[in-house]
Amino acid sequence: MEIKFSHDVDNVLKEAKKQNKPVLLDFSAAPM
Amino acid sequence: MWPDERVVRFVNQNFLPARVHVKDDADAFQRYGEKYNAHWTPTVLELDPNGEEQWRLEGFLPLDDFLGQLMLGRAHMDFKQGKWADAEKRFREIVEKLPKADGAAEALYWAGVSKYKASHDPSALKETAKAFSTRYKDSSWAKKASIWA
């Protein structure tokens, strides 16, 4: 079980509007 | 932090998750960092469906405190939208499930406000002030609620 973070923020913002769902935006420096 | 099962469940149920990495997504990090005034990591933003910032966490927090702050932000989002019952439920969930977390006292305060906003019954505020007489007595939220006693 994990969080599938998208790195395409533009697309996530579009989807959020379409789905009427909030966005969690993580600014990270953690090793990937 | 992120692999914790409770955090994963909460994020997946409540948000579309996106990440910009300071090195691996350098252009996006700069672009969105400027757009959202985020110039340090970790910074976690909760945005409403229109992309407007509603909640911000900057810096590391231990797990329960981190989850509590995520939940608090989501509860405030419902509150700002006038979804009083949903907001109250979310605020109370923080107090019940993460009573020692950073944010629990704030959640207790706003749970009472949400109940009052839904009912316009002042007893909701009085009950909240009473609850603060036994919990989180030293918090600033207890002081804020003291006017309702």
Image (tube, rainbow, N blue to C red):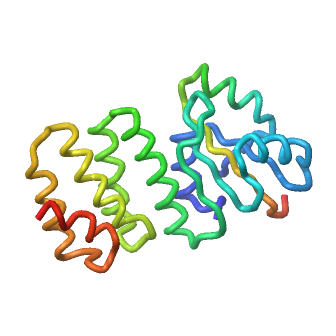
Which residue, as the protein is rendered here, is positioned at the far bottom? B138
Q: Residue at x 16, y 54 (%)?
A: B125
Find residue B73 and report its horizontal and vertical position in percent.
48, 50
- Residue at 70% in and 51% down: A26
From the image, which quarter does the C terminus of chain A lie in?
A: bottom right
Name the residue nearer the viewer: B42 or B145: B145
| Quarter of the rendering containing residue B23 | bottom right
Residue displayed at 36% across by 41% down: B79
Q: Quadrant of residue B2?
A: bottom right
Where's residue B80, x and y in %? 40, 38
Residue at horizontal 31%, vertical 53%? B110
Q: How many marks?
A: 0
Task: Answer left or right for B98 relative to B40.
Answer: left
Considering every residue shown, the one lying at the far top of the view is A18
Instruction: Estimate the x, y position of residue B39 in percent, counting from the top left.
Output: 77, 56
Give the left or right position of residue B144, taking residue A17 as reference: left
Residue B93, given in percent of the width and then of the height, sits at 34, 55
Image height check: is A21 above or below B39? above
In the foreground, B33 or B86: B33
Asked where in the image residue A23 lies, by quadrant, the reply is top right
**For residue B43, side relative to residue B29 (left or right):** left
